[in-house]
Image (tube, rainbow, N blue to C red):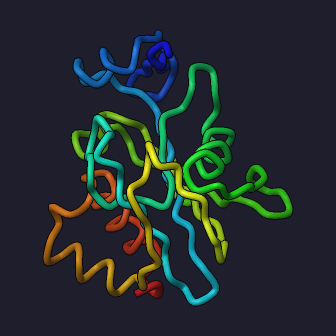
């Protein structure tokens, strides 16, 4: 299987070139990703524990689904694809009958691995089909439990998720 090719972007998140995944990560080039937070009717968030096979943040807890944009792909399309590939959840694009909702965007920084990230949310009760090469396990957690766990053991989480969760709580203070 050939290595993934990512779009490289500038400080305005405009595509300026392409490079293989390994090179993008090794050189710290700006690129694009999505993260999706899936909540159930009880207000719990589904988190995944990343597979030990992952090249970044292996074995760390992370968003419900996340991933890089393919070359030429837009953020919304990527979010729909990632929830389908990683947790087996079939959704439609934003604004449709079973939508993903765009929450906020985080600019590329050290914590995100130099990724511009759009963060999405959706509702689902599961059950999910976890992609074994991507995800070791997953579970439902109350927002209070995630916040407490993160304050006690931040090393258990992917650095991008720590930033995403703190930003999410700032924007949604009634969640906790």
User: In the picture provided, is 20 more to the left or to the right than 154?
Assistant: right
Look at 44% across and 73% down and name the residue there: 139
User: In the picture provided, is 63 more to the left or to the right than 162?
Assistant: right
> Quadrant of the rendered structure where residue 115 is?
top left
Q: Nearer the viewer, residue 54 or 42?
A: 54
User: In the picture provided, is 148 more to the left or to the right than 152?
Assistant: right
Q: Position of residue 89 (x, y in %)?
A: 67, 58
Q: On screen, 26 above or below 55?
A: above
Look at 38% across and 21% down and name the residue there: 21
Q: Position of residue 86 (x, y in %)?
A: 55, 50
Q: On screen, 136 above or below 43?
A: above
**Residue at the front extreme, as displayed:** 132
Q: On screen, 158 above or below 142?
A: above
Q: Position of residue 55 (x, y in %)?
A: 29, 35
Q: Position of residue 137 (x, y in %)?
A: 41, 63
Q: How many marks?
A: 0
Look at 14% across and 77% down and name the residue there: 152
> Quadrant of the rendered structure where residue 148 is?
bottom left
Q: On screen, 48 above or below 4?
A: below
Look at 79% across and 63% down and name the residue there: 98
The quadrant of the rendering that contains the C terminus is bottom left
């Amino acid at each position: 299987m050939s290595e993934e090719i990512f779009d490289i972007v500038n400080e305005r998140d405009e595509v300026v070139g392409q490079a293989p995944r390994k090179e993008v990560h090794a050189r710290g080039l700006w690129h694009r990703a999505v993260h999706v937070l899936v909540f159930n009717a009880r207000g719990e968030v589904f988190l995944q524990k990343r597979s030990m096979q992952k090249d970044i943040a292996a074995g760390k807890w992370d968003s419900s689904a996340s991933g890089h944009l393919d070359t030429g792909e837009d953020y919304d399309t990527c979010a729909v694809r990632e929830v389908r590939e990683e947790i087996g959840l079939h959704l439609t694009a934003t604004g449709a009958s079973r939508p993903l909702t765009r929450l906020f965007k985080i600019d590329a920084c050290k914590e995100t691995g130099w990724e511009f990230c759009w963060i999405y949310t959706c509702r689902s009760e599961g059950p999910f089909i976890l992609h074994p090469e991507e995800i070791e396990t997953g579970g439902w957690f109350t927002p209070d439990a995630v916040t407490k766990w993160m304050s006690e053991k931040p090393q258990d989480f992917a650095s991008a998720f720590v930033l995403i969760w703190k930003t999410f709580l700032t924007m949604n203070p009634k969640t906790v």
